């Protein structure tokens, strides 16, 4: 169990309203010191509103927010942002165009002596791999370099908590994933606690120790990335995370399902009555190539992904499933391939009425 000293940020049944519209519903979670957490969800789910509430930029209508064990937000009280000891990294970088990189990073260090400020800025330039660029201006930098400056500026005052609002969404996909990994490494090396907001699950998986899936202003699941993927709490989480195909099935026993593509044994027991109609989610990594298998799939679509190929396979009369094969197993559209189901983490839900 977490001791209270380990908990840096805690939300207790927090709600937020815009006028008469409730956008956050009774939301609770805790973040331990040194943890990178992420709020992940589609646009409009309330994740940025919640981040702004943690920063003190948005009032809450119920519940409370605690930082370092102290209440900083209630329905009747909001501690100002500048008194929360929080750093923020924004989507649009929010750099001062008339200031150099060095002055942007040192902007929040005006109470320090010039020597102390220069030492801290030099340290941060090395940390974010921008040594030698301190005298440049934001317009002279690439998007990725500007985001590194924004990150260094947020870290400069040594905040207890850093909030990141869709920090990489304006960058191209390859740079976004690389910068997410680099940022995670920086945070871990410095022991920084962070809360990230994003709609990009690859970004979330690259950075976060804990992920909260948000849906309609509610927290659908707060868990590790591994559990979010393999043990989704409900159908929305299962459908939102990763890729996969739902197959109709029937519960034969507590751990056996009859499906459109045959009988599949589960890795867990289900307490529903035998004969219950169910939906089984098969991930692409649950479907393995096996040329000797009697289960065959016909290639309907294929997408080359470098080391792997993502196939859409027609199996049986109506079912279509996704499968990831090593890319040297290059099959043509219409070709039949042997497959076996290796679903070590079965994801099963009661069928919709």
Image (cartoon, rainbow, N blue to C red):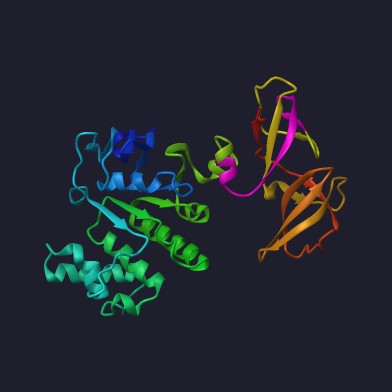
- Please give the range of residues in magenta: 237-258
In this view, 96 is above or below 21 = below
- Give the quadrant of the N terminus: top left
- Give the quadrant of the C terminus: top right
For residue 270, what is the image quadrant?
top right
Question: Relative to residue 182, is residue 20 drawn left or right?
Answer: left
Q: How many marks?
A: 0
Report the front residue among 69 and 138: 138
The residue under the point 21% across, 70% down is 119
Is 241 part of what is drawn in magenta? yes
The residue under the point 70% across, 19% down is 273
In this view, 115 is above or below 349 = below
Q: Where residue 160 sits in the image (x, y, percent)?
A: 27, 50
Q: Is residue 29 in sight in this rendering?
A: no
Question: Relative to residue 297, is residue 211 drawn left or right?
Answer: left
Q: Residue furthest top?
A: 273
Q: Where residue 165 sits in the image (x, y, percent)?
A: 37, 55
Report the front residue among 149 and 199: 199
Question: Relative to residue 73, is residue 50 drawn left or right?
Answer: right
Q: Is residue 1 in sight in this rendering?
A: yes
The residue under the point 33% across, 52% down is 163
The residue under the point 14% across, 71% down is 115
Is 171 part of what is drawn in magenta? no
Q: Where residue 347 sits in the image (x, y, percent)?
A: 64, 37
């Amino acid at each position: 169990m977490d001791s209270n000293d380990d908990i840096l940020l805690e939300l207790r049944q927090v709600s937020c309203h815009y006028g008469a519209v409730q956008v956050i519903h009774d939301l609770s979670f805790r973040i331990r010191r040194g943890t990178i957490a992420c709020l992940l969800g589609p646009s409009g789910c309330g994740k940025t509103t919640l981040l702004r509430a943690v920063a003190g930029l948005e009032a809450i209508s119920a519940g409370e927010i605690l930082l370092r064990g102290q209440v900083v937000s209630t329905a009747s009280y909001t501690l100002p942002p500048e008194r929360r000891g929080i750093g923020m990294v924004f989507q649009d970088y929010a750099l001062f165009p008339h200031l150099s990189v060095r002055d942007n990073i040192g902007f929040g260090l005006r109470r320090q002596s010039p020597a102390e400020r220069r030492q801290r800025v030099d340290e941060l330039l090395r940390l974010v791999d921008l040594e030698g660029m301190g005298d440049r201006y934001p317009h002279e930098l690439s998007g990725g370099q500007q985001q590194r400056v924004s990150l260094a500026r947020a870290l400069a005052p040594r905040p207890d908590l850093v909030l990141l609002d869709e920090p990489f969404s304006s960058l191209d996909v390859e740079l976004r994933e690389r910068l997410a990994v680099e940022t995670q490494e920086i945070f871990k090396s410095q022991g920084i606690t962070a809360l990230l907001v994003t709609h990009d699950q690859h970004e979330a998986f690259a950075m976060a120790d804990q992920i909260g899936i948000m849906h309609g202003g509610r927290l659908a699941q707060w868990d590790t990335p591994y559990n979010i993927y393999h043990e989704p709490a409900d159908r929305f989480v299962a459908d939102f995370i990763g890729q996969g195909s739902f197959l109709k099935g029937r519960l034969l026993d507590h751990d056996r399902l009859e499906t459109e593509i045959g009988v599949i044994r589960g890795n867990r027991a289900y307490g529903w009555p035998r004969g219950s109609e169910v939906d089984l989610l098969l991930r692409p990594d649950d479907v393995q190539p096996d040329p000797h298998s009697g289960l065959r799939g016909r290639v309907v679509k294929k997408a080359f992904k470098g080391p792997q190929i993502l196939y859409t396979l027609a199996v049986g009369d109506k079912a279509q499933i996704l499968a990831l094969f090593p890319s040297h197993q290059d099959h043509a559209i219409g070709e039949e391939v042997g497959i076996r189901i290796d679903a070590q983490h079965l994801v099963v839900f009661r069928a919709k009425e």
